Amino acid sequence: MNPEFLLSAIIFVPAVAAFLLAFFDSRNVEVIRFWSLGATIITFGLTLALWMQFDPAVPGLQMNVAAEWIPTWNVWYRLGVDGISLPLVLLTGLISMLSMAASWSITKHVKGYMVLFLLLESGMMGVFLSIDFFLFYVFWEVMLLPMYFLIGVWGGPRKEYAAIKFFLYTLAGSVLMLIAMLMFYFDTGATVESFNLVELAKVAAGAADAKLATTLTPSLQITAFILLFIGFAIKLPAFPVHTWLPDAHVEAPTPISMILAGVLLKMGGYGIIRIAFPLCPYGAQYAAYALVAIGVISIIYGAFAALAQTDFKRLVAYSSVSHMGYVLLGLAVWKINEGTGATIGGDFWLMGMNGAMFQMIAHGISSAGMFFMVGVIYDRVHHRDLNRFGGLMAKMPLYGGLSAGLFFAGLGLPGLCGFIGEVFVVISTWNYSPLLAIIAASGVILTAGYILWAMQRVYLGAEYKGPHAEDITPINGREVAIAGTLLALAIVLGVYPRVMFDVMSTSTTELVESLKTGYQKAATTVNQSQAQR
């Protein structure tokens, strides 16, 4: 398949399916469901085709697409894929397909739900494949509206509050991102390459073949990085801008919680590693200790908050805050010798970068699985009170076994996907600060505490004490297929993690080297300026 067509097809197949779906008879619910599921299956198949055509030995962007879009403002339709974006494209295709299969529980306004779901998938794919800053921003905003309505219309009792809170937080981050984008645009003279993320990164790194005849000053990098980081940290989410997440998760329907945890949170980490770091290497190093501290605080705070919950879904939501803290921590463990400007323990920082990337994939699988298992029992008993559960392992043994596997993956049990990323991040943090590494490692103990306690209350208690006990029936084949797929992937990634490391390592290595060069270039400028004074 033509690579240029393939990238565009991955983005727009769901959107085209959503457009055609608008002409379907709303009463043909089963036809609408299978049409939508078919669109997500085709999209996932296209992402697998992309994986087959991808060359992991090439560090830069591949299969580049470039066409004029808005010539007046030098905005181009630019797409590309590398070892950083490909794993997230695969994850998005997979989780979207499984979440669509989980959407059989949606019975209200099914056609409207499916249209919005497919538009959401197009927006998410566009974010991961765009290499034009303006186009990235457009897809980022396109993704916002469908999620707002999916929570606000199909959510729980406080759905309007949760949807508005999600929208306002994300929109605030988008405004900060827009300001940073305009700073780059006008600082580089508003030329054809001013929105090109590849060329902006080359300028920041001081590459000789950069097409933009400009420099990104250290002060510009610091200011822009702060704006970009806040915008992406909201989506990550990191403490203290995380408070929208538990409300959104609790009120969202199960399939949307799967998408939210499995894909949308990864956009925050992706934005940091794709835009904030490459465009502002000096700013990233300037804020490195603050980022590491925020990551550690997120890990511990999220774990303690999860321990305090009695709502099953809210517990899993706070666990995401804790687990995504490892992503921020791994990205930021960048230690510089102030005298020489050289990176100390660069191999450890590369390990942290790879660990953070792997943690995003692992968390996307385990968290989507945990939210799905919570949704399975909620569909039967219509409550999530941990204190009224108990004895589900005896009543639903297959459900209990699959749940145990997915929750242990989230716990970080060796042999499952959650272990690899966390241990890589903690080891890399030791080079940065042994104290912070010890605190981050203690998060694993707290994670074990809240997950094991939740499992004891839900699955191993003496008896079920809540309402609708007569509706507790074994899980059906569709539910087994969804949970079994996620558990199988959790095992594969835990036992054979190089299936992802082989894809991403060349690109992360190039990124780390580029950031080192970019920081040293900016630091030299600062030193020369200070010497002249």
Image (cartoon, rainbow, N blue to C red):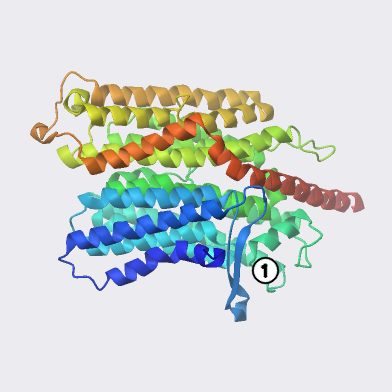
Name the residue located 53 percent from the left edge and 30 percent from the top edge: 420
User: Splitting the image into 4 quarters, where does residue 487 fall?
Assistant: top left
* Residue 198 shown left or right of residue 532 in the figure: left
**Residue lying at the far front of the rendered structure:** 1
Disc 1 secondary structure class: loop
**What amino acid is at disc 1?**
Ser
Q: Is residue 204 above or below residue 466?
A: below
Q: x%, y% of residue 495? A: 49, 29
Q: Mark 1 points at which residue?
A: 194
Q: x%, y% of residue 443? A: 49, 26
Name the residue located 56 percent from the left edge and 67 percent from the top edge: 134
Front one among 286 and 104: 104
Res 461 seen here: yes
Q: Is residue 19 above or below residue 334?
A: below
Name the residue located 18 percent from the left edge and 18 percent from the top edge: 462
Front one among 482 and 439: 482
**Residue lying at the far right of the rendered structure:** 532
